[in-house]
Image (spheres, rainbow, N blue to C red):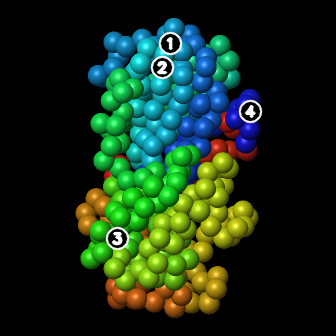
Amino acid sequence: MDPGSTDRWTGAARATVGLVPEGDTVYLTGKRLRAALSGRSLVRGELRHPRLVEHDLAGRTVLDVATVGKHLFTRFDDGRSLHSHLRLDGSWHLYRPGMSWQRPAHQARAVLETAERTAVGFSLHDLELLPTSEEPRLVGHLGPDLLDPAWDETHAAEALRRFTARGSSELGPVLLEQRVMAGLGNLYKTEVCFLLGLSPWTLVRDVSDPAAAIALARELLLRNADRPQQSTTGELARDRQTWVFERAGQRCRRCGTRIRTAEQGDSVYARIAYWCPRCQPGPSPALTATTTPRVARSARASRPFPTRESPGSSG
């Protein structure tokens, strides 16, 4: 959808509900907030967070909206930035004057309004107003951002260094580790493993071409960064967008084997792993079930971000 569209858009459930959004969701959220707010003065700037209620941003001019991995920074002309992270259920909506909000007002944590648009941040658990110069304090621990517009060989080399340093770890969790490279969530982790032809339980040291794995992860994010749909198959039709993600018990699109699922990761870091036992040989748990384990499930099929009617792991 055109960033200048008249209608509302949301930025959290594009990829998952119950899981942290993918990096391309955050990237697209930032892009559309930037188009709506950058270079414009705020006529209303409310922060409805217990620690920030005394701050009034009215009169400030938005200089830029930047994304780093899954973090958003709205930068103002007084040298401060508003940091937000969508986490599990956060979202930013854009509205035209007079439009009704699509979520309850009591869930709003930030209201940034110009003469033409109103940006409302709902359920933003991580919200901080800080000097722009201190942004690295919040994101300095992250690995290279796979959607960084300035990505070059230096970024690729650093991602490769961090990735190969996890040689004794399983591939799936390492792809999700934001300290290795920032931006991947469970959808892209799952699809990268499938396209590499590797079980998510493969050890990183057994990945024959780790540089190609990183390049593939970046390519998939870039492919979807500027559109609401997320596809790794090249198809945008419903139920045709992924190879194995959220297709538990269904037939593999390549070989016809039933797709398996199991939990991978410890405690709060556990995620659902989807894989085809034939196309992705290697270590795996016992193949005893074809249904999704009892961990937080995504609801990608019902995501509202961004709708046709509307303007979206730790780290």
Name the residue type under label 4.
Ser
Residue 193 location in percent, x, y?
48, 75
Disc 1, disc 2: CB below 8 Å? yes
The residue that label 1 is drawn on is 60
* Secondary structure under the numbered disc 3 in the rendered image: helix
Comparing marks 3 and 4, which lies closer to the viewer?
3
Q: Specify whether 69 is left or right of 204.
A: right
Sequence-first disc among 2 and 3: 2
The residue at 37%/83% (across/down) is 206
Res. 64 image quadrant: top right
Q: Are marks 2 and 4 in contact (CB under 8 Å)?
A: no
**How far apart are the alpha carbons under marks 3 and 1?**
44 Å
Number of other residues with Cα within 10 Å of mark 2, as a class: few under 14, some 14 to 19, many 20 or more: many
Front position among marks 3 and 1: 3
Q: Residue 58 placed where, x, y %?
A: 49, 10
Given residues 192 and 284, the one toward you in this image is 192
Q: Is residue 310 above or below residue 46?
A: below
Q: Residues within 10 Å of mark 4 (few under 14, many from 20)?
A: some
Is the residue marked by circle 3 packed among few (<14), some (14-19), or many (20+) residues within 10 Å?
A: some
Task: Residue under label 2, please give it.
Answer: 76
Graded by Cα atoms within 10 Å as few (under 14), some (14 to 19) or many (20 or more), the crowding at tag 1 reads some
**Residue bearing mark 4:** 5
Say if residue 22 shows up in the picture.
no
In the image, residue 37 above or below residue 160: above
Task: Tell me, yes or no, whether the two marked residues, 3 and 1, touch with CB atoms within 8 Å.
Answer: no
Q: Indicate left or right for 3 with 38 as reference.
A: right
Give the Cα distance between marks 2 and 4.
24 Å
Q: Is residue 147 visible in this depiction of the protein?
A: yes
Closer to the eye: label 4 or 1: 1
Residue type highlighted by circle 3: Thr
Q: CA distance from mark 3 to mark 4?
A: 43 Å
User: Quick one: label 3 or label 1, which is nearer the N terminus?
Assistant: 1
